[in-house]
Image (tube, rainbow, N blue to C red):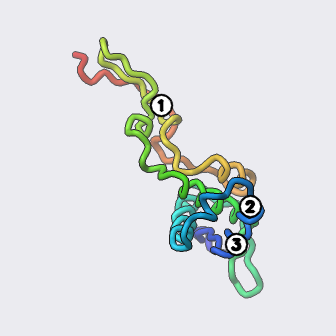
Amino acid sequence: MADDARPVASLNDANEYFAGRLYADAWTNAPESERTRALTQASYLIAGAFAFRDAARVETSNGAVRWHERVAAAICEEALWLLKSDPTQFPQTLALGITRVEVANLSATFDRARAAPLICDAARRLLTDLADYEPIDDEGGSFASTPLAL
């Protein structure tokens, strides 16, 4: 089984998932083309953020990969989250992880753990025990900067 297989959820699977989910108006009100794009983007973001364990998928007798239902649900939740907001459009200070600024001393404190996320909490929780979250190298940790101090 290919370790680099990208998890996917079909439009039909997602429609079925959201038929039984509360507060899915952003999904049900979106045009089909936006739903499809949201699922595709969610799939790539999930694939890039997690290392899947063996329990996350099985290979069928014909060699196809079948993903665990919680992996598909995570993709659906991520797609819904993407339809509600664009995680790449956070205010720049939040995207950078700025947690404190001092004007008089011209300093700032950054905490990458507080940087704008690209994976929603629901998807992370659904993938517990099925995948390991792999934050980007510069996530986590904090540092202070005083760029104008001599």
Q: Is residue 118 above or below residue 71?
A: above
Of pointers 2 and 1, the one earlier in the residue sequence = 2
Of pointers 1 and 3, the one earlier in the residue sequence = 3
The image shows residue 52 at horizontal and vertical percentages of: 66, 60
- Which dot, 1 or 3, sits closer to the camera? 3
Q: Is residue 149 above or below residue 12?
A: above
CA gap, disc 1 and disc 3 = 38 Å
Q: In the picture, residue 82 is in which quadrant? A: bottom right
Image quadrant containing the C terminus: top left
Residue drawn 34% across and 24% down? 145
The image shows residue 74 at horizontal and vertical percentages of: 67, 58
CA gap, disc 3 and disc 2 = 12 Å
Q: Amino acid at mark 3?
A: Asp
The residue to which callout 3 is attached is 13
Few, some or many residues within 10 Å of mark 1 (<14, 14–19, 20+) = some
The image shows residue 104 at horizontal and vertical percentages of: 30, 12
The residue to which callout 2 is attached is 70
Q: Is residue 102 above or below residue 22?
A: above
The residue to which callout 1 is attached is 111
